[in-house]
Amino acid sequence: MKIAIIGIGTVGAAVATAVHGTGLAREIVLYDRDGARARAAAEDLGHASAFCYDIDITAASSYRALRGSDIVIIAAGANQKPGETRTDLLQKNVAVIRDIVPRVMPYVNPKTVKFIVVTNPLDVMVMLTQQLSKIPTQRVIGTGTMLDSARLRTLISRMFNVSTQSINAYVLGEHGDSSVINWASMSIGAIGLDDFVRQTKSSLTQNARKTIEHRVRNAAYDIIRGRGATWDGIGAAVADLVRTIVHNERRVLTVSIYDPTTAPRIAMSMPRIVGENGVIASLRPHMAPGESTALRQSARIIRKNFDAIDK
Ligand code: NAD
């Protein structure tokens, strides 16, 4: 398994560390337009290898070194500065994706390669990567709301003192300010949330729900205020996605892929079964009427942002 990571900034480096930690790659290639940065990261991670796995970690000086990559992870581009939204990054990162994807394609097998897109604004970048690479939609996968869903599960876990592993909770739609918290399908074990609250004599007031929603949607802003960027969560999310693909685990993850059958035609996050060939099936969870309305609005926002790209 050869994995290429493009963009070795804060996020790309964390992704490299987390993917390395899975032990699933035989070879990891790091590329950044700042070659010194990629070389330093490869050197550092190479030393880490001596403590765990023999993995061939190199910095690429040109895209040719990506030849034969099974998975290409794109984490390059501008990040949010304090107070900036993901959408503020749109035009800058459109240029980054337009620079990268055509340069990768000559060196990968379009019949098998999988792209994992991390760059924000995520859903629009997934659409653009798919459009430029022309590979099937199910193999251009954005981490989407995997991280938002993890944040939601963490808050629910702390509230009810139950392992995150037993909490099924999805954030749907845009990986951004219009994301939708899908309370209606939430369960702890196989017990619906309201039933769980009743059985355990706990409480979940409307105010508590609003606070959770606010914290999920604003987690990135809070972290960026405190430490300048976010990296650990997204690194773990990408490693989890890589594991699901490499082991053909067919787990249900809230990832973003372009779906030309939806109206409007966009990429956004829904629960999807992911395996060795990428997304195998997309699912529609039970949603309250307000959640369906919010999801349609989220879809319109993604489409509007995509349409605003300089053509
Ligand atoms: P960063 O500024 O630390 O690093 C970006 C890196 O990209 C730099 O090393 C830069 O040299 C490189 N780069 C820029 N243009 C390039 C190009 N054309 N070719 C190759 N390399 C190029 O930023 P960061 O904090 O690592 O964030 C990277 C991206 O990840 C941002 O868009 C950020 O918003 C996004 N992000 C996404 C999630 C998510 O959940 N999807 C989470 C956190 C961050």
Image (tube, rainbow, N blue to C red):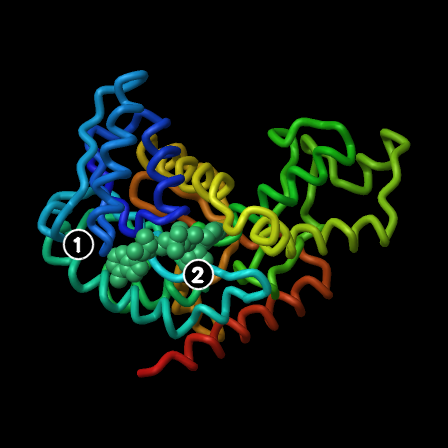
Query: How far is mark 2 from mark 1, CA to CA?
Result: 24 Å
- Residue labelled with disc 2: 120
Q: Does the residue tagged 2 have its C-beta within 8 Å of any atom of ligand 1?
A: yes
Q: In percent of the image, x 63 and y 52: which residue is there? A: 222
Whichever of callouts 2 and 1 sits on the residue coming sooner in the sequence is: 1
Left or right for 239, reference 286: left
What residue type is disc 1 on? Pro
Vertical side of 218 occupied by 86: above or below: below
Inspect this view and state whether residue 204 appears.
yes
Q: Nearer the viewer, mark 2 or mark 1?
A: 2
The numbered dot on residue 110 is 1
CB under 8 Å between discs 2 and 1: no
Inspect this view and state whether residue 136 appears.
no
Q: Position of residue 3 (x, y in %)?
A: 24, 39
Vertical side of 130 occupied by 239: above or below: above
Left or right for 300, reference 204: left
Which element type, helix, strand or loop, lies under badge 1? loop
Which element type, helix, strand or loop, lies under badge 2? loop
Vertical side of 156 occupied by 257: above or below: below
The numbered dot on residue 278 is none
Report the front residue among 130 and 41: 41
What residue type is disc 2 on? Asn
Q: How crowded is mark 1: few (under 14 residues within 10 Å), some or many (20 or more)?
A: some
Q: In percent of the image, x 42 and y 75: which residue is there? A: 306
Q: In percent of the image, x 77 and y 36: which residue is there? A: 159
Q: Where is residue 247 in the image (x, y as percent from the top left)?
A: 34, 30
Q: Where is residue 75 in the image (x, y as percent from the top left)?
A: 35, 52
Q: Position of residue 108 (x, y in %)?
A: 14, 50
